[in-house]
Image (spheres, rainbow, N blue to C red):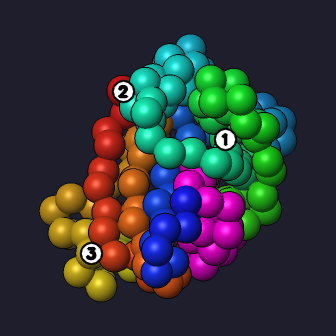
């Protein structure tokens, strides 16, 4: 996140785009790619985040997450960096740390990680319970100060 005065930062938490039905996929789920719809959702992320500060693109090492942020990385000239802190089952604790350490970072992760994060933000009163969602291809724009999330805005999938 772009560390502004007082340690302020922004993190873009992205739920991977559509990758089809997990139950239908044969093989290692970490290798499940985006569906056609998911490819379009990934392209829409470029438009959704256009003009926003971005200094790093981090992804779960799962193929569907990498494919979700590859168009964004290409549009910004940034590499996609794998982070196990964003993988399924990793929990949300490393999510914000991974982003704030990198400037204005886009982080692509999974429903379990993002759902737990959003649940905690609801508990803290940062996000209203009625607005707690994390659709595939969506983005939570999180503002933080000194490592604490102080504001959140939801961008639905494009």
Q: Which mark is residue 65?
A: 1
Gap between marks 2 and 3, in whole Å? 24 Å
Residue 30, horizontal then vertical, whole percent: 78, 44
| Among numbered discs 1 and 2, the one appearing first in the sequence | 1
Tell me the SS state at disc 1: helix
Front in this rendered view, residue 153 or 145: 145
Verify CB contact (< 8 Å) between mark 1 and mark 2. no
Q: Is residue 65 left or right of residue 113?
A: right
Height in image: 122 above or below 105? below
**Residue occupying image coordinates x 18% and y 69%:** 128
Q: Is residue 26 magenta?
A: no
On-image quarter of the C terminus: top left
Q: Earlier in the sequence, mark 2 or mark 3?
A: 3
Tell me, for residue 119, which label it has, or none: none
Q: Residue at x 66, y 41 (%)?
A: 65
Magenta stretch in the rendered image: 89-107
In space, the residues marked 3 and 1 are separated at their CA atoms by 26 Å
What residue is pinned by disc 2?
158
Task: Find out whether residue 92 is within the magenta segment.
Answer: yes
């Amino acid at each position: 996140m772009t560390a502004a005065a007082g340690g302020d930062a922004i993190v873009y938490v992205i739920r991977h785009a559509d990758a089809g039905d997990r139950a239908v996929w044969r093989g290692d789920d970490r290798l499940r790619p985006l569906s056609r719809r998911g490819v379009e959702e990934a392209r829409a992320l470029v438009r959704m985040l256009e003009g926003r500060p971005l200094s790093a693109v981090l992804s779960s090492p799962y193929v569907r997450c990498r494919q979700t942020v590859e168009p964004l990385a290409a549009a910004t000239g940034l590499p996609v960096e794998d982070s196990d802190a964003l993988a399924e089952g990793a929990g949300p604790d490393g999510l914000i740390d991974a982003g704030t350490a990198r400037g204005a970072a886009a982080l692509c992760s999974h429903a379990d990680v993002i759902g737990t994060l959003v649940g905690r933000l609801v508990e803290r009163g940062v996000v209203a319970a009625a607005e707690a969602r994390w659709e595939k291809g969506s983005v939570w724009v999180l503002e933080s100060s000194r490592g604490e999330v102080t504001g959140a805005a939801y961008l639905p999938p494009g």
